Amino acid sequence: MDEGEEDMAKWTEIPVDRMLTESDDAYLQQAEAVVEDVYRVLGRPRGLRIGEEPDRDGQYYHYLTKWIYALGQLGKVKPEYHQRAVQLVKDIHPAFVVPGVGVHWKMKEDLSGPYPGFGLGGLDYYDGYVQYKLLDAVALSSEIEDMDLGLGESLWISHFFPDEPWAKVLRKRSEETLASMWINTGNGGFFCRHPQQRNTKFAFTNFGVSYGLASWKIWPERVDRINQFFECYQSHDEYDTKSESMLTTMWVDVAPDRGYFCREPGHKKVKFAFTNFGVSYALQSVGLWPERVNKVNAFFESYKSQDEYDTDAITHVMHLNSLFPGVFVASYKAVSG
């Protein structure tokens, strides 16, 4: 997360599943208090401002969809929050969404127009489609119709609704294309850039494919071979330094049952708890490296950085999300009362 983007994000990362599955009403009261705080500080006639500081003006679509998701979870316990989430969609959708074209990444604070210097979001169409359907496919039917997915979406997005025709088409076409792009090597394997470019490979796109494959639970042996291959592969260009490509090279084992992801490959001793917790529940969402997830949680149970991160709320919120990812992952099943 970029510096200066903490305000709304720290609220959207509240572990709502923990609050909603505990029998103690105090958790529900805390969840409701969070909602009221957000609207008191960031609420606008339509939508929510990004943050409190002067330079955090405007509205992000991807922040709003996360808040819609959070309200939807609370709405499973108290229906009025479900309705607030539906109304929020109806308030912001006409401003952000251009049917058949895309979704504006950022809008002016009053939603009167796109924020200068920002274009269309790359995945916002899919984000909106999934969040709207998770919330209320009937009440938001016209908004869902605007979110025309087309083809080419990732396997990860499609796994949320695996039985729907569009998801089946995406999986089938993705598998067929990927099958023609697979290259076996002596130390693993990779998906090439294009069927006619067998020697061209990018680590970060292979890692993205591996998440999609894991979400569908297909080709687990190829997921393993991708990770094996890119443990040592270097492209000797700027992609060697991109964070997506470095995750597998950033792991540090501290003990048989403990470990962490360092800040970057060249700084093995530099570590931040809240970023490790973020990586942890992302891994859990696609079922990857469960042993490393456990090691991360074990390590940071006792680790102290002796700075402000030990007391900052974001660290503890992210820790709870790592321990109880709950509704952040598609496989979550609510505890029945």
Image (tube, rainbow, N blue to C red):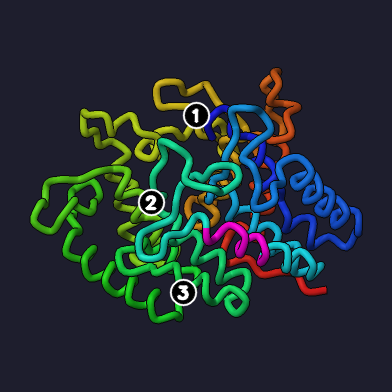
Distance between the alpha carbons at the discs numbered 2 and 1: 28 Å
Is 275 inside the magenta-drawn segment? no
Residue located 15% across and 45% down the image: 200
**Residue 162 vs residue 51, the one in the foreground:** 51
Q: Is residue 41 above or below residue 101?
A: above
> Can you tell which mark lies on residue 145?
3
**Residue 75 vs residue 61, the one in the foreground:** 61
The x, y position of residue 122, in whole percent, is: 38, 51
Q: Nearer the viewer, mark 2 or mark 1?
A: 2
- Give the crowd class for mark 3: few <14, some 14-19, many >=20 residues within 10 Å: few
Residue at label 2?
A: 122
Image quadrant for the N terminus?
top right
Residue located 41% across and 55% down the image: 211
The x, y position of residue 263, in whole percent, is: 49, 27
Q: Is residue 209 left or right of residue 278?
A: left
State yes or no: discs 2 and 3 in contact (Cβ < 8 Å).
Answer: no
The x, y position of residue 311, in whole percent, is: 76, 27
